[in-house]
Image (cartoon, rainbow, N blue to C red):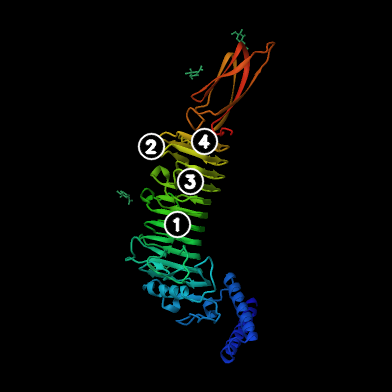
Amino acid sequence: MARVALMRFLLLVMACFFVTKAYDENLPPRTISVNNYHHEAMHRLKAFKASITRLDSIASPPSSLSPSSTPSPLPSQGQKKPRVYLVTSYGADPTGNSDSTEALLAAIADAANGPSEGFLIRGISDLGGAQIYLQGGNYTISKPLKLPVAGVGNLMIHGGTIRASENFPPDGYLIDLSTRGESKKSSTSSSYNYEFITLKDLLLDSNFRGGGISVINSLRTNIDNCYITHFATNGILVQSGHETYIRNSFLGQHITAGGDKEERNFSGTGIRLQGNDNAVTDVVIFSAAIGILVSGQANVFSGVHCYNKASSFGGTGIYLKLPGLTQTRIVNSYMDYTNIVAEDPVQLHISSSFFLGDANIVLKSIKGVVNGVSIVDNMFTGLNKGVEIVKLDESNSPFKQIDQVIVDRNIVKGMDLKATAAKKSINGNGTSWTLDFNKILLFPNLIKHVMYSFSSIGNTFPNHALRNVSENRVVIESNEAVTANVFVTVDQGIANSP
Ligand SMILES: *[C@@H]1O[C@H](CO)[C@@H](O)[C@H](O)[C@H]1NC(C)=O
Ligand SMILES: *[C@@H]1O[C@H](CO)[C@@H](O)[C@H](O)[C@H]1NC(C)=O
Ligand SMILES: *[C@@H]1O[C@H](CO)[C@@H](O)[C@H](O)[C@H]1NC(C)=O
Ligand SMILES: *[C@@H]1O[C@H](CO)[C@@H](O)[C@H](O)[C@H]1NC(C)=O
């Protein structure tokens, strides 16, 4: 029933569309009422198209609706059509048997050179939401897909599978948002290549030749619901620009679900961020030597699950390679046998995350700086082999500049708890009470603050004092022998008050 009603509505809308078109051709141009009518009909058609694309249960093929089903679907300037470029209309082979490089590039070129409506950021022409639609096909390509011009935005490539052929260049990316020598579309040039390009609902198979997606010097790029596999270099590379949002995606060099016999040989990097202000949210990296390699600032990771290559086999989940200015937040993530390594971290926050299988956090000294680091409220589960939840790698140099480091309130099972704050109490009879915090404190010989309470029962009121704090040991003494309980809290992280 719903389908019949829909079809009727569809016919009605299409009738409006054709009537409008006929008016358009027959009447003098720029008649206001006609244009309004046209505009409204188009608006309804677009809305209707959007509604059927959303409703998966009503599997009416969008291609039958699209006005762009001729080999040259490029609407001329001023004619307002939805800009959906169907790649099969350009001769792309959806079976993957023959090479579709030129067909896909032609569709992309038409979209990128299509009508634009003003600008996004200055110098970036707004393509009005043009889409290159892969129609659920499987396409083989032998060259990276690049835009023919720089300076465009509001464009989407979506809905299908793209695979590298045997002769794809080993340093290429299947989708390459870079500009190397292309002309700019607009005369006003932007300092960014592209803005608001969306890559969505794609399976990208690099066939162990090159990488998946590269985003170079672009602004506000979406990578959403993509499955990127068989990369030899990087699944996704982001270089300069900002605000590339990588969401709801799966990346793995090998298609595996853990416990792979070949795991020791996994190579490549899932996501390499060489820029600032990006976000990776709800992303799984299931195979690669390094899950995410970061050398830019102010990036945020949330809901990331790394089981790319166990750290005991030499893998790393998230590697923060920006000694001296890290500015990274990792929250609500799952490090599954993979660790986080941070070089000379300055401003790093890790919280609400789960570390499984002896996965831990390694603070790696380059010049001995660790400043503004909080590692709090995480869960760690290990294999009872004495692995520390946070470990200092001082093989290059010891940490010398330590300030505002808070490692606290982590929940630990089967691993060694490390923290920058600790509490302990002892009972004793005598004049001296020594409490040793070396087992738990993260940094050697560093206690910035001590508080203690001294409770003794009996008839005397002894004098007592904190007498010695060194080598992470605290000594309390009294002037006469008594039986007392001494409770001490110590802190390595409190900054000196101004
Ligand atoms: C896609 O095309 C490739 C290359 O021809 C082929 O090996 C693969 O089996 C195809 N996959 C699907 C799902 O059609
Ligand atoms: C893994 O790599 C090593 C050396 O890099 C090689 O000797 C070994 O055969 C590889 N294992 C597999 C299963 O490919
Ligand atoms: C504490 O030590 C003194 C002598 O050193 C002894 O007389 C006293 O009984 C002890 N008290 C307790 C509770 O052990
Ligand atoms: C504090 O204790 C250390 C040994 O832990 C010792 O070397 C040092 O001399 C003591 N300092 C004082 C003031 O007693």
Q: Position of residue 323 (x, y in %)?
A: 44, 43
Could you tell me which secondary element the residue under label 1 belongs to?
strand
Dots 4, 3 in contact, CB < 8 A: no
Residue designated by label 3: 326
Q: Position of residue 345 (x, y in %)?
A: 47, 42
Amino acid tagged 2: Asn
Measured along the vertical axis of the image, is residue 388 above or below residue 288? above
Q: Which mark is residue 396?
A: 2
User: What's the CA distance linking mark 4 and mark 3?
Assistant: 15 Å
The answer to whether the residue bearing label 4 lies less than 8 angstroms from the nearest atom of ligand 4 is: no
Q: Position of residue 306 (x, y in %)?
A: 47, 50
Amino acid tagged 1: Ser
Closer to the chain start, of discs 3 and 1, is 1
Residue designated by label 4: 403
Instruction: Specify few, some or many for label 3: CA neighbours under 10 Å numbering under 14, 14-19, or 20 or more.
Output: many
- 407 or 50: nearer the viewer: 407
Closer to the chain start, of discs 4 and 2, is 2
Q: Nearer the viewer, mark 4 or mark 2?
A: 4
